[in-house]
Amino acid sequence: MAQQTDNPTNRVGSIENRNFLSPIGFKFSIAKMPGVDFFCQAANIPSISCKEDPVYSVVNKFYMPGDELEYEPLFIKFLIDENMKNWYQCHDWMRTIATPKTQKEFTYTRKKLESQWKGTGDDSDWKSDCSLSILSSNYRVVSEFVFKDCFPTSLSTINFDSSVSDINYFTAEITLRYDYYDYYVGDAAYATDKTMKSTYQQSELGNPLTSMT
């Protein structure tokens, strides 16, 4: 039998918590767009894929697992506030990265970036970590997905139309690219399944963090 790792989900045993995951139980957070996370209506955990490498032989072609993971983009949908402040936050972030008018618009330095959780988030420079917290039926954190070094790549259209009869408030969608994501098991998961060791709000060395903001 293969030796088990310390991964909290890689434990022998049945699923102890028989409740199902709710699509409305989540909270999104990103330091560079605080207006977006407050009004966030939809987010996703992107798919991942691992390509296979063919191995040729005289009888057939075999496959070995590849050594790289490919992550799909992160998509966020949020309500636009009346002053459009949260829409401006995304627009201005993209504007200062792409510099469509002049290179002087680029106000960031392209240096190695630290995680926003190590400070206030102000030193994250032109990228930023973001977090998607998954909540239990009691609205406690079951898990947290942290997306490393995100930056926006698209911002959706806003269509005004005076002919509509019913007012549906504007939403916007943004696409975020990132390097990879990690997940952390929350205390709420351990409370309902003792085989799931909590790693939420811990550093990479396993030390507890006093604050995630």
Image (cartoon, rainbow, N blue to C red):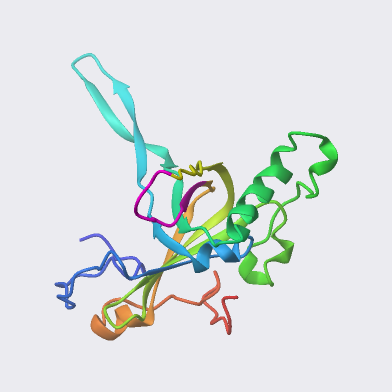
Asked if residue 164 lies in the magenta stretch, the reply is yes
Locate residue 186 relative to residue 192 in the image: left or right.
right
**Residue 65: x %, y % from top left:** 33, 37
**Residue 145: x %, y % from top left:** 44, 63
Asked if residue 83 lies in the magenta stretch, the reply is no
Name the quarter where the C terminus is drawn: bottom right
Residue at screen point 51% across, 69% down: 38
Furthest residue to the top? 58
Locate residue 78 relative to residue 98 in the image: left or right.
left
- Nearest the viewer among 177 and 204 is 177
Question: What segment is highlighted magenta in the picture?
Answer: 163-175
**Residue 53: x %, y % from top left:** 35, 28
**Residue 22: x %, y % from top left:** 25, 68
Locate residue 128 relative to residue 138 in the image: left or right.
right
Residue at screen point 59% across, 66% down: 34
Q: Quadrant of residue 153?
A: top right
Name the quarter where the N terminus is drawn: bottom left
Overall secondary structure of the magenta stretch? Answer: loop
Q: Is residue 10 above or below residue 107?
A: below
Q: Quadrant of residue 17?
A: bottom left
Locate residue 131 relative to residue 97 in the image: left or right.
left
Q: Is residue 210 above or below residue 117?
A: below
